[in-house]
Image: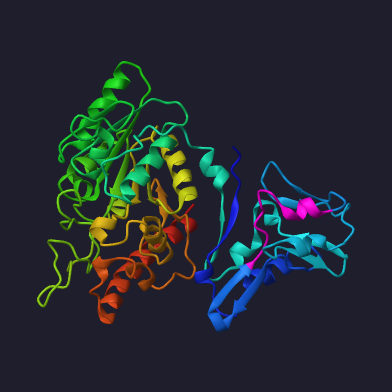
Amino acid sequence: MNFHNILRIDYGQCASECNACQEACEREGNRGGVGVIKSLHIPKVKFHGAVTCLQCAIPMCQDICPTGAIFKDEEDGVVRINQDRCVGCGLCTVVCPYGGVFYDPVSQKSVKCDYCNGDPKCVAACPQNALSFQRVNLVVSHLGQDTLSPAMGQCQGCGTELGARFALRNLMADGEDVVTAGGPGCSLSMLQGTEASVSRLGPGIATFMTNLPSTMTGVKRYYQKIGKKVRCVIFGGDGLTADVGFQPLSGAVERGEKLIYICDDNEAYMATGIQRSSTTPFKAWTTTTPVGKQKRGKGVVPKYVPLLLALQGASYVATVSISHLEDFTLKLEKAKRKVEEGFCYLHMLAPCPTGWRAPIDSTVEMARMAVETNYFPLWEAEGKRFQMTYPIANPRPLEEFTKLMGRFGHLSEEELRDMEKVIRERVTFIEGLCKLSEQNP
C-alpha cells in the first residue's frame, strides 16, 4: 500500500480575516497569480479556515475530464493537471465536492494545488501554524514490524504505549538486533508483560529503579566482547529517570556508553498511584501535590532532564512527541547513527489520560497542544550544539493545553500566568542556546 504526504489544515486555529496562505500561493507565480488555496471566513458561524484540493484517492475531477488532462500521480499521490491537454471546459471545477479545483481566467484553464512539488509555500506563510505538511511517506518508510502484543495491560489511551510501540517499529526496521530494558513502571509492564504473559517479541531485561542504565551497560559490553552488534534500548519512566535512577543515568552519559535511552515522561509516578515526580509540572495536581485551601498543586518548577544531559555532553539529546511523528522519526534515525559515538537520550512526552484526568481519546491532542503552546518544545542537541526542530513562531495560548485535562482544572488566571512564565523562561533559554550554536558553527 502506498502512503502519501498530506496538507493538514487546523480549522480551529485559523485566525479571523487572515489570508496569508492564499496570498503566499498567489505569489508562487507558476499559476499566473491564481491562488489554489482559498481562505474561507464565515463569521456568522465563527468559521475560519481554508479550502484546497484534498488529493482524493478516486478523483471525480479525473473521471469527468474529457481530455484525460487530470491524473493522480502514483509516486506522490498528488492529483495533477496536464496544462497542455486541458481545454478549459471547467467541468472539474463543477464536479469537485470540496471546491478544490479553480479556473484561471487568464490562461482559461483549470488549476489546482500540487503541494508546490513537496514544499507548499502556504505552510511557511501561515502565522497561526494552522497549516502543516505531513510527510507520511517519511514516517512509514522507516517503520518495521510491530513486535508488541496488540492486547496490552496499559490503561486505555496510554501515551507510553503509543510512543514505545512507534519507537520500537523504527528501531527494529533496519534488521539490527534490539535488546530492551526497563525498570519498574508503566513501560516495564508493557515491554516484559504481566504475570505469565509476554508482551514483546524479542529479548529484554527488567531491572530495579536504581540500576537501569548500569545494568544495560553490562549487557552492551557483553555483546561487544563477543563481537555481536546489538542495539541496546532503554525505556524508563520520568520518576525513574529524573529521581532515584538519575545517578546511574548521569554516569552512563559521563562514560559515553553506547546506549539509546527513551524517557517516557507522563509527568508523575503513574503506575503506583499518580504521585508527583521531579518532572511533574509547576502547579499540577497529583495525589501528593493536592489542591485545597493550603496547597495549589506542585509548588516548584520541574527538573528539565534533557537539558541537563545535553549540557553534560551526551552524544545526542532530543525531545520528541507522539503527536509529531515526522520529527520523532528523524530523531530516532539520528539516534541510531549517533549511538556509535556515545550515549543518546530521547525525552518523550507521553500523556496519561488516567493521571492527567482527561478523556481516553485525547492523548494525541494533548501531546499536540503541548507542542503548539510551547509547553513541550521540540529541540535537539548534538555535542552541545542546539537547534529547534519544530519552532513555534506564534504559540497558542497555554489554556488550549491546560483545558484538556483535570490536573490543571483548579488554576486561577494568576496561577496560569505564573505557569506561563516558567514555560516562557525555559523556551527562551533553549532558544538562546540555539542562537549561540548558530553564531559559533
Q: Position of residue 262 (x, y in %)?
A: 32, 43
Magenta residues, start to end: 51-65
Does 58 appear in magenta? yes
Q: Is residue 182 left or right of residue 426?
A: left
Please tell me which residue is depicted at 16% across the width and 41% down the height of the picture.
209
- Magenta: main secondary structure: loop
**Quarter of the figure with residue 436:** bottom left
As drawn, 318 above or below 390: above
Q: Is residue 70 left or right of residue 320?
A: right
Q: Is residue 179 left or right of residue 56?
A: left
Residue 112 visible in the snapshot: yes
Does 366 appear in magenta? no
For the N terminus, give its image quadrant: top right
> Between 331 and 99, which is closer to the camera in this rendering?
99
As drawn, 425 above or below 361: below
Q: Residue furthest left?
A: 294
Q: Residue furthest bottom?
A: 44
Q: Residue furthest top?
A: 226
**Quarter of the figure with residue 181:** top left
> Between 353 and 115, which is closer to the camera in this rendering?
353
Q: Position of residue 243 (x, y in %)?
A: 17, 50
> Between 232 and 154, which is closer to the camera in this rendering?
154
Please tell me which residue is depicted at 54% across the width and 38% down the height of the picture.
141
Please tell me which residue is depicted at 26% across the width and 67% down the height of the picture.
406
Residue 30 visible in the snapshot: no
How many discs mark residues in the rendered view? 0
Q: Position of residue 180 (x, y in %)?
A: 30, 32
Q: Position of residue 182 (x, y in %)?
A: 24, 37
As drawn, 203 above or below 163: above
**Quarter of the figure with residue 296:** bottom left
* Coloration mode: rainbow
